[in-house]
Amino acid sequence: MPKFFKKASKQAGLPPGTLVHIGERKAEHTRISIIDYNETEFKETEVKNIEECFPFKETPTTTWINIDGLHDISLIEKIGKCYGLHPLILEDIVNTSQRPKYEDFQNYLYIVVKMLSYDEKEKEIKVEQVSIILGPNYVISFQEIEGDIFDPIRQRIRNAKGRIRSEGADYLAYSLLDTIVDNYFIVLEQVGERIERIEEEVLGNPTPHTLSAINNLKSDAIFLRKAVWPLRDVISGLERSESPLIRKGTRLFLRDVYDHAIQVIDSVETFRDMISGKLDIYLSSMSNKMNEVMKVLTIIATIFIPITFVAGIYGMNFDPDVSRFNMPELSWKYGYIGAWIVMIVMALIMVYYFKRKKWI
Amino acid sequence: MPKFFKKASKQAGLPPGTLVHIGERKAEHTRISIIDYNETEFKETEVKNIEECFPFKETPTTTWINIDGLHDISLIEKIGKCYGLHPLILEDIVNTSQRPKYEDFQNYLYIVVKMLSYDEKEKEIKVEQVSIILGPNYVISFQEIEGDIFDPIRQRIRNAKGRIRSEGADYLAYSLLDTIVDNYFIVLEQVGERIERIEEEVLGNPTPHTLSAINNLKSDAIFLRKAVWPLRDVISGLERSESPLIRKGTRLFLRDVYDHAIQVIDSVETFRDMISGKLDIYLSSMSNKMNEVMKVLTIIATIFIPITFVAGIYGMNFDPDVSRFNMPELSWKYGYIGAWIVMIVMALIMVYYFKRKKWI
Amino acid sequence: MPKFFKKASKQAGLPPGTLVHIGERKAEHTRISIIDYNETEFKETEVKNIEECFPFKETPTTTWINIDGLHDISLIEKIGKCYGLHPLILEDIVNTSQRPKYEDFQNYLYIVVKMLSYDEKEKEIKVEQVSIILGPNYVISFQEIEGDIFDPIRQRIRNAKGRIRSEGADYLAYSLLDTIVDNYFIVLEQVGERIERIEEEVLGNPTPHTLSAINNLKSDAIFLRKAVWPLRDVISGLERSESPLIRKGTRLFLRDVYDHAIQVIDSVETFRDMISGKLDIYLSSMSNKMNEVMKVLTIIATIFIPITFVAGIYGMNFDPDVSRFNMPELSWKYGYIGAWIVMIVMALIMVYYFKRKKWI
Amino acid sequence: MPKFFKKASKQAGLPPGTLVHIGERKAEHTRISIIDYNETEFKETEVKNIEECFPFKETPTTTWINIDGLHDISLIEKIGKCYGLHPLILEDIVNTSQRPKYEDFQNYLYIVVKMLSYDEKEKEIKVEQVSIILGPNYVISFQEIEGDIFDPIRQRIRNAKGRIRSEGADYLAYSLLDTIVDNYFIVLEQVGERIERIEEEVLGNPTPHTLSAINNLKSDAIFLRKAVWPLRDVISGLERSESPLIRKGTRLFLRDVYDHAIQVIDSVETFRDMISGKLDIYLSSMSNKMNEVMKVLTIIATIFIPITFVAGIYGMNFDPDVSRFNMPELSWKYGYIGAWIVMIVMALIMVYYFKRKKWI
Amino acid sequence: MPKFFKKASKQAGLPPGTLVHIGERKAEHTRISIIDYNETEFKETEVKNIEECFPFKETPTTTWINIDGLHDISLIEKIGKCYGLHPLILEDIVNTSQRPKYEDFQNYLYIVVKMLSYDEKEKEIKVEQVSIILGPNYVISFQEIEGDIFDPIRQRIRNAKGRIRSEGADYLAYSLLDTIVDNYFIVLEQVGERIERIEEEVLGNPTPHTLSAINNLKSDAIFLRKAVWPLRDVISGLERSESPLIRKGTRLFLRDVYDHAIQVIDSVETFRDMISGKLDIYLSSMSNKMNEVMKVLTIIATIFIPITFVAGIYGMNFDPDVSRFNMPELSWKYGYIGAWIVMIVMALIMVYYFKRKKWI
């Protein structure tokens, strides 16, 4: 289960606009890469100092600055000053407990979403906060760790594949969002397979471990829901925003991402619905098992307790010599065989009773 | 249970508008059939090459191109180019994990819905994605497999029965939707019968198999809901759309399909409500059964354990020769009969107790 | 439980506007009765042929045509043609699986609602579909079976009691709706009484039969809800409609029916709330009962198993002649009495333990 | 539990506007009291005949007519005629199963709300319907029984305390509403205390009686909700109404009552939330208790059954004289002591096992 | 668990605007502190008499009057008179059962919110009502007890740190709200940790104490929800209010608090979701434990009861001298060994059966 509750409390008491990095420090170093392109030109560099990015601000070409690692507060502050970003935005970028949202600051748009991935090794969903600043001719993206999910976009820019080189910064921002949302489907499939596995387990052979697996699925579903629901408003907000930074042609593509986001939300809701009933079925399965255990106990006990009583009777030591009423059966010729017959008949009656009750 | 989670992840990383067929390949070959008609003329052909359809685009008659099988990407691309369809639409047509939706592209409307059918043999609900393109004088419909549910419409066109021949492409599109929605009722009836069967089973004689049947019904209800809810928006969107492609007369008919869709949604919600309680009743039924098992055990054990103890007492070997306090009962005249009387009285007290408790 | 799922699938594949009677055929014959009145005149007839109704169309008096029995398709078609009703309306009239709704067709309004009654004999809620056509000077009502719930209205017209004779067709239609809604209260009271009965049963002496009674109540509540919720929109639609067929004075009365409908919906929701918890209480009650059974078993077994062991000990046949260690107790003077004392003390300890645990 | 379902069905079949008293007849006699006041004058009388009220209609002073007891239909009709009240209003006044609502009839406003009180003796919530007619210079209030909750208002008028004497009829109506809503808090506190008591009981020592107490609380919460929710719309309707009968200054006070109503609704929702989980905790508590019972049974049975078997073995009568294989243990020197050792070791192993399982 | 239900009923029957302190008296004395500042000047005093505050009303500098302790009614009344506050506002300030709300009174805004803190010692969430009056150049804040959460703001004012000294009263009010909301995160983290602890407990080793811990968490979640939900409307109301008391620059900051409030609400909802399932898992865990107990009992009983019966058989005293049919086994050579073999085989069959059932 991903951590739900980050140390967001660190910030309590500080004046607004104070930059505090909230969240795990996932990356060792901060890495800054720049891609600068238009339809004909293309330039890709990795820089050490954030100051090297600043000249790109003035160029008419589209510039994509990607920053991996959010713990270097002073770097974030410098880029904020250069691009004129509001202090509250910078505060949000480094606070990784943000809720996905979108805000319009006239000169630029600020988008923050959650990027999800399924960690096969630790069998858990990983989450990373991605902030995107969309300006007139630049896109700045902030990630917590270096990742390769944006690599296909870089490839497309390098190879001038698709329409990406001929479109502007808004199309680039759309491409980043599209990639993030498409990635959700991979996580959803993993969860879907886990649900199907649990389904079989719960009906077939539920164990205490199944209980904890259901619990994990439930937490994951709650977690996914929290990450995914606000997406709807973020993307429809972008699509319907009146900001001149988003051209009409790009809106059509945003509508497509919106459809995908709705599909993701739909799937998460379906997951919730499917998981919600599983615990009841687990309980019912357990109840069935207990029933079976009880039946075995009841059948054995109910057959043997009465006939053991019969055996007990003839184990009594009443003295037949004293009186002819004292256990005359013991000296009958067929006394022993009679006792067996009585016991077998009693057992058969019980068996018949259980058969009629359909217990055996 | 129908598969919930298709490999929608295949597409992650590809540029938007890339056509990837997502879903099972259900049809061997792609089949293209064309019906071209107006009030007086009628022509029906099956073509091998999609190019044979193109001339129909220019005719003033209403043309219905029906394509079965979505795996042939190049064919979809060709038809898209000929009819000027947006790449994102083509992407949606071949991705069978779409959510039902409706989009207005000025020159044509794009409608995607789910067609449901109940597979009697495999006892499960089958789902198929149907895309409909409605242009000024043509309708293009895409199905995953060849089906015969549109056959009655073909018959009506052939026989010029009803008003279909005298109406345009919008009425044809309505007819397709109407047929799909009407077909839902067949699936709903099947589910309704299964619910009634479960109802009897759960109250009468619940078995572990009942549990898995309830689970299946629940999954089916979730699945139906997912397929059916968006329909409401699709059809009301069409009805209220301001597109000139839909004439006023047809809107009245769309209102009728809308009413049917609401009825379908209503029924699915009723199903959910009815199924939701079944698991609790199953649990209660199980609890009743367990109670009965426990009662039998308790009655038998509680009657026989004390009297077996009495028999045990007189099976002890204390030596009456040593002292007159040692088991004098053994040499009483009516000792044995007295022991029986004690045991029978104890048993009767228990039986009386159970009668009063209404356990027997 | 009323049937939830009618053979609505019959219609799949037929062209729209095809009349198919869906639902049970409840009435033997179709019965047509006409009441024609204004403030001063009054005429009441029962006709054999629907054609006899047609002349009333032209009269300035208010005409109420009531048709019981919907299976005679040709009759419905004739009246539809005479009064210029849309084929889709006729289709809806004979399809008794309609959802309550209201539609405005300029010249007339179409209202379809459910009439409920409680069948004392079969202990179930009966439902009947009532369609009402409200024209400028006529009301046509369609019922599935002959019923007498409209009789008080007929009486009021005959006796010129109340304001009904001085008002027009809209007031008549309102009166029909008002009567139908008022009748809901009778059904609600029956359900209310059943709930109170169940409440006592579930807390007092729950039996497996209680379980099935709760299940029936739940189904009935779902059913009522389905019939009653759309009523709200139907009546508020009528009240707020801009149709000149409904005069301002009548709207005030419709507002009153609306209040009643809301009260009905409120009560149905209250029912649902009250029933929803009953199953949990049943389960808890069952759990209590099981607990009691278990306690009896445990008390008896826990008292007697240890002392039976003691008795068993002294039933062993170790040979005291071989060694003085072999069961010397058997030849002690107070051996037998000592054994009894041991056993009684063991039993008393157990009883004390159970008293402290408050099990006895 | 208050009665949910009144004989509202009495009215079915009657023409609209027919006055039928629905509800229990709670008051013996009808009592009419009049208070007539303005800033300087004050007059208070109790009248026998309703006709004595009529002269007050014309005076410029504010008149408050309070009627206790609704069963006297003719009295209600007379006052209705004098003050020009709509027959439907009169019908609503005497039908105590009304839902709280507010209606604007130009010349007067009609408000109907529920007054709640907690009957300490019968430990149940009592409900009473209060109707208020607000005219330009009069307020008529209808109660089911004589009550003293309006007494503080009368005192304030008599003593000219607060601003009540200097304000008009709208302020008086507000004062009545305010008093009714303030009274809700007393009922809420009682319910709150009952919830806290149940909370302790359910976790500490749940009994079957706890179950019925939870059930009662649940019914009460449903009941409160039904009475309280519509209040929100009633008061916000009044506050935002454009009726000239409510002056701007009074609206501010109505806003305050609205805040209180929201607080009441909030509390009722909190109650529901708190109660809803109690049954599950009861079940869990019961399950814990059963577990404990089972453990005691299992420990005792599992320790004694095997050792009783050992005792049984040496109670067998195989003849050692026939063969040296027949029960040689019986004639061993330490046979009896050995048997004890075996039994004690078996018992200790069991005890150790239970200790490890943490059952003891 | 914090007290849900304060004695709000105290006020019932009093005229509106009567000041009654509702809630615990938490502070011994009332403490009044004043901070008066603008960009250049700064003055901080603590006063004994409220009258000492009044001169600050006229100064152009920003004045922050903070009052700790609400039980001194006359003091509140005096300040109300001096600053022209509406009596209903004063009533709300001293009634600590207020729902968070915001009201615009032209000359000043009235904001009431809940301040939360986690009391480590008593392991419970403490709540305190904070009322804020925002005037053109003053802020009056009312707290129930002296607290130090506003201390960082005082420090910032003293040190002229951040922009607080250069901004007006609206920025000060924002700072107070921001501090309160930031403080929520500390409480949320505590609750989050408790949930994680319960999660482990419930799956690992649930005890009856776990049940009460889950119950407490649930109550806390309900309580948090009640305190936090209205916050959303309060802050968005402030942000969107058209009051000139809030300048445009401050709105941007309010938007930031709003985002935090949404995050808080989101987290509370996540808590609720996570807690809601815990009780079911507890029940399932308990059911698992019971199952295990039952299995042990069944295995031991089912193995030993039949073989004890065999031992019982050969403890019978049928007289072999009377007839050769009476217990001939007793005098067989290998009778005893045979009996052992029979018993061992019976036991092994049982063990095999349990192995196959996977019970051992």
Image: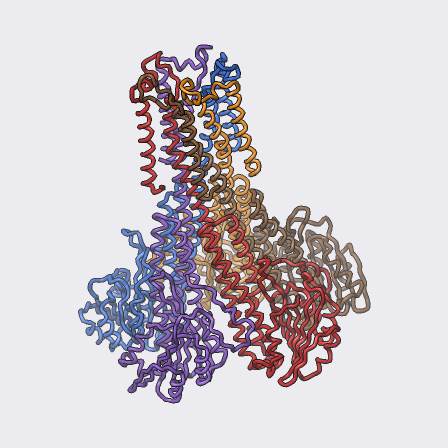
Chain colours: A red, B purple, C blue, D orange, E brown
Q: Is residue C125 above or below residue D291?
A: below
Q: Is residue C136 visible?
A: no
Residue in the picture at 34% in, 35% down: A350
Whole-percent x and y of residue C185?
A: 36, 57
Number of dots carrying numbers: 0
Observer-nearest residue: D57 or D340? Answer: D340
Horizontal side of A226 relative to C68 (left or right) equals: right
Observer-nearest residue: D191 or A59? Answer: A59
Q: In this view, does E253 lie above or below D301?
A: below
Q: Is residue E215 above or below residue D250?
A: above
Observer-nearest residue: B69 or D59? Answer: B69
Horizontal side of B242 relative to A5 (left or right) equals: left
Q: Quadrant of residue A300?
A: top left
Whole-percent x and y of residue C129?
A: 30, 64
Q: Can residue B88 be seen in this view?
A: yes
Q: Is residue E316 above or below residue A113?
A: above
Whole-percent x and y of residue E248?
A: 68, 73
Q: Can you say which quadrant of the picture contains the N terminus of chain C?
A: bottom left
Q: In which quarter of the image is residue C146?
A: bottom left
Whole-percent x and y of residue E71?
A: 68, 51
Observer-nearest residue: C107 or C209? Answer: C209
Residue in the picture at 53% in, 75% down: A255
Residue in the picture at 53% in, 45% down: D194
Horizontal side of E224 relative to B297 (left or right) equals: right
Residue in the picture at 59% in, 49% down: E200
Q: Quadrant of residue E49?
A: bottom right
